[in-house]
Each structure stands twice: as C-alpha cells, then as structure tokens.
C-alpha cells in the first residue's frame, strides 16, 4: 500500500471516534436497551465522526457478522467508488440508528466473529486497493483465485528439487498450451476439493449467459 500511496493511486484517512465523545472520559459505548450482554457503540460520537468524513452520499461499509458475504465480486464493486467509508465496530456492534442513517453496505467476512472491526476493515481495504489500476499488473490479477470462478492452481519456483520433491515436468517443458491445460485442470481439481460450491455457481452463470 505504501507504494500505491506514493504513486497517488490511493489515499486513506483514519478518524478516531473517541475524538468526538461528549464527556471528559471520551465514552463511546453504553449498555444496550432491553438488556443483554456486552456494550454498544453510542450514536452521537459515531455520527459526528461520520459527518467529519462527509459520509452522507458515499458508500459507507460496516463490517458485521450479520451482513452480506464479502467476496471478490463485491470487492470489484467497491473499487469503482471514488471514496469508501468504513466503520470499525466494537463490542456488540453499533446503534441501529447509525446503520439506518449512514450505512449503505453491511458486510461479513465469514461465519465467525472478530472482537475488532479494524481487522475486518483492513481485510476489505487490502482486497480492494490492489484492484486499482497501476497497483498490480493486470496479468497477475487475471490468474488469481476467484477471478475466473475457480481457485488458483499450485505454484512452484526454484529450486527444481526441494527435499526430494520435484517440480511437475509439464511446467519445465516450455509447451505453453500443455502448461495452460495443466493449470486449468489443477484449478478445477483444487476447486472441486476445497470449494465445490463455486463450480455450481459457475455453471449457473454459464447457463444464464
């Protein structure tokens, strides 16, 4: 990211919600109405922080386990935005009124819970910024997992033999057509083994096309 920033390809700004707290203790959380465990981020300081970011009218993303699944296709949506605002939740989450007033996208990284919204936001930032033109070579992006609806094939580099394990002969053959066919077969094999649901989604897309 440092190189992308130096090139002027991406800019980011971090806003501390506690700077907008209303008391001398910089309190930003409180117990939930209706009872229950944990604490909720208060709406006043969070709204003030979002106003400072001129969030209204922008794509405002709130990472939360109850949101839509974050994936490569969604990252492609975000990279088209001039600006994206990310809300880093904590504890049991944020006041629903903030979601109703500001949030455009509730996004989940997966079926698990993190204690820090900062970690989830960093994952989203890292996934999206690398898709910007000029950050990574287009050829590299085209062969990554999920780009073609498949997981990426196995990769090898020097030395040719490591701890008795040899690089597949096909990759040393110099026969580009055969190598491409091998890559495709290995991608399908790996996808079938680890993420078979992707093959079903891909078949449906091909039928619709």
Image (cartoon, rainbow, N blue to C red):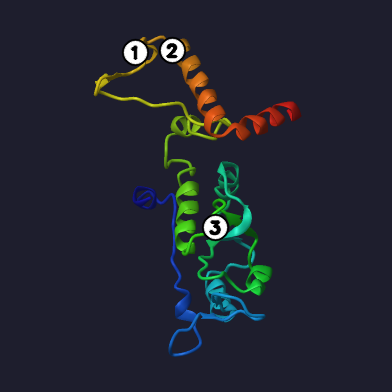
In the picture of the structure, the residue carrying the numbered disc 2 is 176
Element assignment for label 1: helix
Question: Which one is nearer the viewer's eye here, 37 or 103?
Answer: 37
Q: Is residue 68 above or below residue 167?
A: below
In the image shown, does 102 or 137 lie closer to the viewer? 102
Q: What is the C-alpha distance between the residues marked 3 and 1?
A: 45 Å
| Mark positioned earlier in the residue sequence (3 or 1) | 3
Q: In the displayed structure, does residue 203 sit left or right of residue 107?
A: right
Name the quarter where the C terminus is drawn. top right
Give the SS element for disc 3.
Answer: loop
* Comparing labels 3 and 1, the label whose residue is closer to the camera: 1
Judge the density around disc 1: few (<14), some (14-19), many (≥20) Cα neighbours within 10 Å: few
Q: Residue at x 54, y 76 (%)?
A: 39
| Along the line of sight, the residue nearer the viewer: 65 or 171 | 65
Residue 50 pos. (x, y %): 56, 71
Q: Position of residue 10 (x, y in %)?
A: 44, 52
Q: Residue at x 26, y 23 (%)?
A: 158
Q: Which residue is mark 3?
A: 83
Q: Is residue 35 left or right of residue 114?
A: right
- Image coordinates of residue 89 in percent, x first then y, are 52, 67
Q: Which residue is mark 1?
A: 172
């Amino acid at each position: 990211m440092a190189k992308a920033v130096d090139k002027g390809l991406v800019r980011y700004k971090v806003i501390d919600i506690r700077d907008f707290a209303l008391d001398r203790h910089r309190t930003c959380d409180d117990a939930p109405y209706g009872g229950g465990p944990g604490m909720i981020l208060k709406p006043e300081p969070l709204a003030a922080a979002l106003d400072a970011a001129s969030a209204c009218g922008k794509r405002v993303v709130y990472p939360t386990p109850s949101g839509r699944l974050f994936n490569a296709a969604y990252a492609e949506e975000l990279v088209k935005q001039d600006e994206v605002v990310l809300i880093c939740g904590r504890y049991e989450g944020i006041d629903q009124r903030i979601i109703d007033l500001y949030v455009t996208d509730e996004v989940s990284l997966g079926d698990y819970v993190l204690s820090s919204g900062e970690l989830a936001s960093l994952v989203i930032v890292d996934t999206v910024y690398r898709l910007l033109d000029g950050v990574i070579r287009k050829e590299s992006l085209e062969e990554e997992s999920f780009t073609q609806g498949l997981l990426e094939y196995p990769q090898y580099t020097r030395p040719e033999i490591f701890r008795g394990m040899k690089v597949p002969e096909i990759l040393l053959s110099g026969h580009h057509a055969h190598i491409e066919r091998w890559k495709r077969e290995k991608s399908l094999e790996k996808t079938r083994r680890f993420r078979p649901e992707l093959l079903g989604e891909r078949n449906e897309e091909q039928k619709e096309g």
